[in-house]
Image: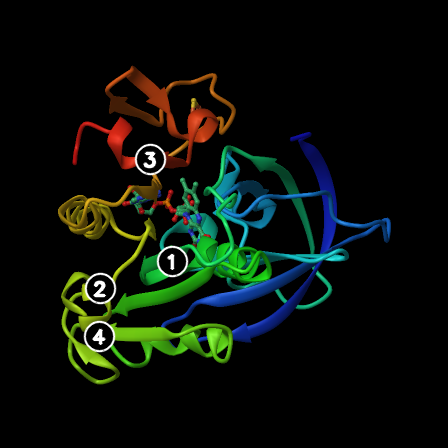
Amino acid sequence: MKKYELETVVRVSERYGSGLLHLVLERTDGKDMPEMAPGQFVEVAVDRAKVLLNRPISIFNRTDKALELLVSPIGTATKALCEYVTGDRLRIIGPLGHGFSTQFAAGTRVLLMGGGVGIAPLYYQLRTLLSAGVKAEVVYGNRTAQDAEICALFSGLAPLHVCTDDGTAGFHGLVTQHPATEGAFDFVQVCGPKPMMKACARLAAAKGVPAEVSLENQMACGLGACLCCVEDSKDGNVCVCKNGPVFNTSLLKWQ
Ligand SMILES: Cc1cc2nc3c(=O)[nH]c(=O)nc-3n(C[C@H](O)[C@H](O)[C@H](O)COP(=O)(O)OP(=O)(O)OC[C@H]3O[C@@H](n4cnc5c(N)ncnc54)[C@H](O)[C@@H]3O)c2cc1C
Ligand code: FES
């Protein structure tokens, strides 16, 4: 897929309990957003943070006129990005990487599992799957009810099962312990903290179904040039930015 460098204007859509920011970006030239696949990401130039490197952020949603992002204020650049207000300009490069599988037959049962800000690439993936007649369900975990507020965006789309570590919303426990995971599925797709993704991969393996995970290794160039994001795989070292970020778990050594 062709890569673009785009100047965009920001609209702050919503701020969620734990500090997550939902941003809607439109091109300053008024043209349509380029095609982007769910699970791909963009490199965001957070000029205001005065950091040298762009930061990788997943494509939360893409419409003809807009690209939507979900940002968690973790460090220098993401905290600065969360201070952006409607009307600010932002330069992005993308789409980058390879996303989730979407070519399933209608009626295929796909379980999407998200943890924390790892919910970001699953929204566009869910919309894409549903529009193809795939039966998708989401299990989402976060620490508290406040942290899980982002789930509101998914309401009415598909069955959504919320889990919290402290039991303040939904199921009290881990996503892999939720009763919904005991159902029959044909495919599992995951994004979240690495220990959670490993547990989800084990769950899928125990069910005998394939799984894909979206890795969030720290990146520098985002283009496959610096080798800063490598992951050990059965095919040797792979660059998460170029060969991923989505990988079938059968390729990874950590399962
Ligand atoms: C493919 C991909 C997609 C991503 N999608 C999103 C998204 O949709 N929304 C979002 O909010 N974030 C996303 N991230 C994570 C985001 O890129 C990092 O949080 C960001 O780069 C951190 O930059 P910073 O300047 O804010 O933090 P820094 O000041 O650079 O770092 C702050 C602290 O966070 C740690 N850290 C930084 N990046 C990571 C990481 N990737 N994993 C674990 N620890 C890290 C650092 O070691 C440091 O301790 C994604 C990452 C990747 C690789
Ligand atoms: S970030 Fe440079 S090779 Fe992946």
In three-dimensional space, the C-alpha distance between marks 2 and 1, rounded to whole angstroms, equals: 12 Å
Q: Quadrant of ligand 2?
A: top left
Sequence-wise, the earlier of marks 4 and 1 is 1
Location of the C terminus by quadrant is: top left
Task: Inspect the image, locate mark 4, and give the three-letter code of the amino acid beneath it.
Answer: Thr
Q: Kindly state the secondary structure of the residue where label 2 is placed.
A: helix
In three-dimensional space, the C-alpha distance between marks 3 and 4, rounded to whole angstroms, equals: 27 Å
* Residue 126 pos. (x, y %): 49, 60
Comparing 156 with 42, the one in front is 156
Q: Kindly state the secondary structure of the residue where label 4 is placed.
A: strand
In three-dimensional space, the C-alpha distance between marks 1 and 3, rounded to whole angstroms, equals: 17 Å
Instruction: Return the residue at label 3.
Output: 248
Task: Inspect the image, locate mark 1, and give the three-letter code of the amino acid beneath it.
Answer: Arg
Front label number (4 vs 1): 1
- Please tell me in which quadrant of the rendered image residue 183 appears: bottom left
**Residues at marks 2 and 1 touching, judged by CB atoms closer than 8 Å:** no
**Residues at marks 4 and 1 touching, judged by CB atoms closer than 8 Å:** no
- Please tell me in which quadrant of the rendered image residue 177 appears: bottom left
Sequence-wise, the earlier of marks 3 and 2 is 2
Sequence-wise, the earlier of marks 2 and 1 is 1
In three-dimensional space, the C-alpha distance between marks 3 and 2, rounded to whole angstroms, equals: 19 Å
Instruction: Return the residue at label 4.
Output: 164
Task: Inspect the image, locate mark 3, and give the three-letter code of the amino acid beneath it.
Answer: Asn
Tally of marks? 4
Task: Inspect the image, locate mark 2, and give the three-letter code of the amino acid beneath it.
Answer: Thr
* Residue 102 pos. (x, y %): 51, 46
* Residue lying at 70% horizontally and 59% vertically, measured from the top left: 88
Instruction: Return the residue at label 2.
Output: 181
* Residue 107 pos. (x, y %): 46, 59
In three-dimensional space, the C-alpha distance between marks 2 and 4, rounded to whole angstroms, equals: 15 Å
Sequence-wise, the earlier of marks 3 and 4 is 4
Instruction: Return the residue at label 1.
Output: 109
